[in-house]
């Protein structure tokens, strides 16, 4: 009996550290996937915005490519920082936090009319026994830029009747620009208790950090801790005018 008790103690002392190491490693892997998902989602939304911004830079900055590149790079960082849903997660695992995410090598747009985002950043993982290690993560996002069509005058007049317009999900009008204020949701603040009583649930991305004050929309079913949460944006589709059987927006459709 005494010999058996001794062997059990030895086995436990060997197995327990291995078990704890495995569990911690699994937790870190899950956290790194959360980091990748957060960065990739913000990158997707940044690419979508830059696809529209490229039209402005192409129209007003086409004679100064250096200025256009600088303006584009600055806009990428500005929008990426705005679209990141979980700042604390990046601050914890990404070297340098949001500022440590690099877009070096990106084209805004490239020679073929695509927004080509090259995202790279280092994550630091504190592995028990092995210590702290840095790992490079890269992402590549490619999105066609909305540069429009430049043909001769006759062709442009012919295609004017079938231009691209924007329609919100369940919308009743079409819009000539995605930045129309009528495409922005009606966001208003309220108390957390009032939101819960009205049937609102926590946003999967930012609701967990909600304090006493939250943000909701009339048509939504989630409350948000941040007014600029990406989930507060309306779903907008870009379609040909010939595909839309709706009247024009009174603000931007004229």
Image: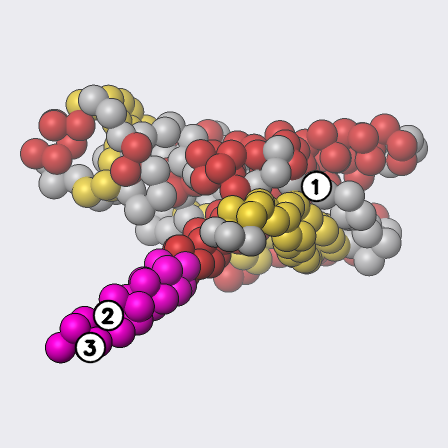
Whole-percent x, y for residue 236 in the image: 46, 48
Residue 203 painted magenta:
no
Task: Give the class, few, some or many, for how many residues have Cα within 10 Å of label 1's Cα (few <14, many ≥20).
Answer: some
Q: Which residue is drawn at 24% across and 25% down?
A: 211
Residue carrying label 3: 4
Q: State the image quarter where residue 15 is shown.
A: bottom left
The nearer-to-camera label among 3 and 1 is: 3
The nearer-to-camera label among 1 and 2 is: 2
Dot 3: what SS? Answer: helix
Q: Residue at x 34, y 38 (%)?
A: 206
The alpha-carbon separation of the residues under discs 3 and 2 comes to 5 Å
Q: Quadrant of the C terminus?
A: top right
Residue carrying label 2: 6
Q: Which residue is drawn at 56% across and 48% down?
A: 131
Residue carrying label 1: 102
Whole-percent x, y for residue 32 in the image: 49, 53
Look at the picture and state if 18 lies above or below 123. Answer: below
The alpha-carbon separation of the residues under discs 1 and 2 comes to 55 Å
Dot 1: what SS? Answer: loop
**Does residue 250 appear anywhere in the picture?**
no
The alpha-carbon separation of the residues under discs 3 and 1 comes to 58 Å
* Observer-nearest of 154 and 64: 64
Q: Which residue is drawn at 81% across and 51% down?
A: 110
Q: In this view, does 60 lie to the left or right of 225?
A: right
Looking at the rendering, the stretch of residues picked out in magenta corresponds to 1-23
Task: Give the class, few, some or many, for how many residues have Cα within 10 Å of label 2's Cα (few <14, many ≥20).
Answer: few
**Does residue 218 appear anywhere in the picture?**
yes
Q: State the image quarter where residue 19 is shown.
A: bottom left
Magenta stretch: helix, strand or loop mostly? helix
Q: Do the residues labelled 3 and 1 touch (CB within 8 Å)?
A: no
Dot 2: what SS? Answer: helix
Whole-percent x, y for residue 190 in the image: 21, 23
């Amino acid at each position: 009996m005494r010999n058996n008790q001794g062997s059990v103690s030895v086995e436990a002392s060997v197995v327990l550290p291995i078990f704890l190491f495995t569990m911690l490693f699994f937790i870190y892997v899950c956290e790194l996937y959360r980091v990748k998902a957060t960065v990739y989602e913000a990158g997707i939304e940044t690419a979508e915005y830059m696809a529209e911004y490229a039209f402005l830079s192409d129209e007003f900055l086409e004679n100064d490519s250096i200025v256009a590149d600088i303006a584009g790079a600055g806009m990428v960082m500005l929008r990426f920082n705005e679209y990141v849903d979980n700042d604390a997660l990046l601050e914890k695992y990404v070297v340098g936090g949001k500022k440590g995410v690099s877009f070096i090598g990106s084209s805004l747009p490239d020679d073929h009319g695509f927004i080509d985002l090259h995202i790279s950043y280092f994550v630091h993982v504190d592995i028990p026994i092995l210590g702290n290690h840095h790992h490079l993560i890269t992402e590549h996002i490619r999105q066609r830029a909305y540069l429009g069509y430049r043909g001769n005058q006759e062709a442009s007049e012919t295609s004017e009747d079938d231009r691209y317009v924007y329609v919100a999900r369940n919308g009743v009008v079409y819009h000539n620009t995605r930045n129309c204020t009528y495409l922005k949701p009606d966001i208003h603040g309220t108390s957390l208790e009032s939101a819960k009583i009205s049937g609102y649930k926590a946003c999967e991305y930012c609701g967990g950090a909600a304090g006493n004050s939250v943000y909701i929309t009339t048509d939504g079913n989630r409350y948000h801790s941040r007014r600029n949460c990406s989930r507060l944006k309306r779903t907008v589709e870009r379609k040909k005018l010939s595909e839309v059987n709706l009247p024009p927006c009174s603000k931007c459709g004229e």
